[in-house]
Amino acid sequence: MNRPDGRTGGRAVATAVLAAVFLTASPPDRLTAQDSQFGIRGLGTPGRWESVRSRSTGGAFGPFDPLSPLSEAGLADVPQLTATAMQTASYRDAAVAGTTSALRATRFPLLNVAGRVHRRLAIAAGFTTYLDRSWDVTQRDSVLLRGTLERYTDEITSDGSIADLRLAAASRLSRRIAVGAGLHLLSGSTRETAERRFDDTSFHSVQQLAEVRYSGIGLSGSLLLGVAPGLSVTGWVRADNRLRATVADTTSAETDLPRMAGGGILLAPSPSVRFAGSVAWRGWARAGAGAFDTWSWSAGAEIGSGHMPLRFGVRGGQMPFGPGPTAPTEFAAAAGTGRAFAQGRALLDVGVERLERRGGGLTERVWTALVGLTVRP
Amino acid sequence: MMARRVTLIGGVLLAAACVERVSAPGHCPAFCPSGQIEIVDTVLTSIISRDSTFRGYVTALHAPLLLAADLPGFVDGRAIFRINGFGQRFILSSTDTGAVLGADSARLQLTVARRDTGAHNLSLAFYRLPIRVDSTTTFAGLAGPFTDSLVKRVNIDTLLARPGHKDTLTGDSVVVDTVNHVLVLALKFDTAAARYVGTDSGTVAYGVRVSADSLASIAITKSTLSWQWYLRVDSIGTPVARKPGALGVAFSSFVFDPPPPPPDSTLAVGGVPSARSFLRVALPRFIRDSSQIIRGTLTLVPVAPVQGAPSDSFVVEAHTVFTDVGAKSPIIVDVTRTDTAIIHIGPRDTVRIEVTNLLQFWASDTTRATTLVLRAKQEAASFSLIRFYPSVAQAFRPALRITFVRRFPFGAP
């Protein structure tokens, strides 16, 4: 643990261990990403399949990042066994019809382990959030019962998510070409409750709950091309079949899941300056009424290759679920940095993201703090 | 360098500290789940059948109260009780006894547990009864003593109006217990009224009639009835006064006229001896198995207005049973599974008993007998009786109004 400057790396190791404990101590039912009110009426809020490093650039580096489960081809360049985990804390203001609700949540949306098993073959396994289904809606209303207008309070909640368990492999076929493929198992559960409390206590409260289990499967593939020194492009496709929801071993719903495709470009004019941009299309309209196909884009940069690079980027696009005839939109700006410890064996990445979503009269503004820990033993 | 690192890590930990608040007001339908709580309210008229009435669960002898009433056209009820004496001799000391020469007086303490505050000139009349009164004694059998053996009369309203609630001439007094809402009467019986007859072992028996300008109906607590003798005892030729311990009643009951009518096809609840009605409910499967009951109301139509004084209003309880074996079905006495309704004297309004607790109990355990038992909360504590139309009376049959919630569509997008 002796560093070139002669100082021991003990503190750094301790810091890394502390961060690791902090990240992995989160409760397991929080394997979810940034949730949204737009996801309540649909299947949920899609997760962002990006590591902290990628997300700090607005997601622009996602298709090239071997630790982001967006595409697999980038895995071909993973140098050694690497594990990464991520935690987010979001502070969300949801404003609709003149009222604003302050919401907050802590999530643990990503765990990924990648390593090389052969000179030309690298594999990865891990999970990320496919759909977040955590929300809690309260509503005051009234209903005519037995000739009297009875006032009540409804509270309908869902707590949980659907995770994307990915097993991926990638190979560099030549100096310029790398390909990858992945198998995605969609699995998760939500604990859902429906409660109604009447003001008139003659009517007992309604309390129903269920554990809904979800399952599905998907395949993905990607290609990474080195067009020229310092210039790469990538493309990826993914197809998921159907999301099956079961309650007490009975299928309650089956929903078609989207086909997706995307691509990106990475420009590295020097080893310490990298620019990237990406675009993606997702066919969520297959999911039924109230769902839309979406486009999203991102652009970002990473400046510096030393111990603390600077990352920043922006992204925009559409949300797949929302009221009205058009898809809600979102725009975000993000920035972050990273720090290597223990002679580069532990990396702590941090970032912050400001996000705004609009649609159907609802505006969400979100601050999200991102923390990621990468370990290379 | 170290400070910078600590600041960095602290900031990271602070920003990412575990927090959770996801509850937000719903703006429906745009930002609410597609599934909604669906409530159904329905009146089921044909699910109650095989109803029947049985009488005799609690008799006047076993009732906790002594009833006395003079309600023309309805009932004439009279309380009776007997106090056993000490015998012909009285223990003066551990080695000496003396003959009881007689009684100077006696004091009767009784608690009026219920009376109608609208009754004026409420009076109690005490009659000396034969000491042989027992559970076989009838109203007609005591017609003579209740005619010619008046020993004392006290007007409660007059007593209450006196300073300190005491009558210094008669020695009577009354205490108003505002906590328990009862009157505690201490009544003095003089030598003539309280005769200690040695050959009867000092046993005395009395009957109580109540009268008022109207609404003459009271209930006396059996357990607090006590009798205090003030005796004269011979002590070696010298009469000495002795005050032995107070005596409780050896027998207490009440007689009334007319006798209760025999059970018929109507569903009767209350009265003396107490009557209970049994209703068998066929709860539909789709409600019992797939829904959540949030309110259930049993609707019963009275055949006739309930008679009595307003203070005779009583509470009807609806219970379920461990098992249905007819009249002797064991009742589940549990406050969480008991529903009640107050039966008021006079009006003939439809009686509604909330039976939500019972219906939820049946839904939670489908092996239970779905039998409802209606009984008075305090059986044989009132002459009043209510009769409902049975299930064979198609137009006025008992019905259940059930409000339930269908299964929420969990898992639907």
Image: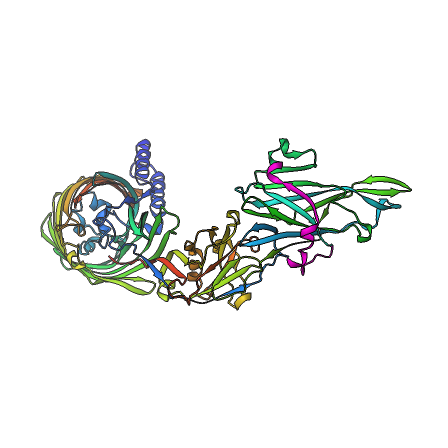
Q: Position of residue A331 (x, y in %)?
A: 16, 43
Q: Quadrant of the C terminus of chain B?
A: bottom left
Numbered marks: total: 0
Q: Position of residue A136 (x, y in %)?
A: 30, 48
Instruction: Report the front residue among B43 and A69.
Output: B43
Left or right, residue B134 beside residue A215? right
Q: Is residue A123 visible in the rendered structure shown here?
A: yes
Instruction: Report the front residue among A270 and B116.
Output: B116
Q: Is residue B375 above or below residue A50?
A: below
Q: Quadrant of the N terminus of chain B?
A: top left
Q: Position of residue B187 (x, y in %)?
A: 68, 41
Q: Residue furthest front?
A: B148
Q: Position of residue A369 (x, y in %)?
A: 26, 40
The magenta span reads B131-159
Give residue B161's quadrant in the image: top right
Q: Is residue B409 above or below residue B20?
A: below
Residue B157 magenta:
yes
Q: Is residue A47 visible in the rendered structure shown here?
A: no
Q: Residue furthest left?
A: A228
Q: Residue furthest right?
A: B236
Instruction: Report the front residue among B297 and A128.
Output: B297
Residue A55 magenta:
no
Tell me, what colour scheme is on the image? rainbow
At a point 74% along the width and 41% down the height, the residue shown is: B190
Instruction: Report the front residue among B378 and B282.
Output: B378
Left or right, residue A162 beside residue A227? right
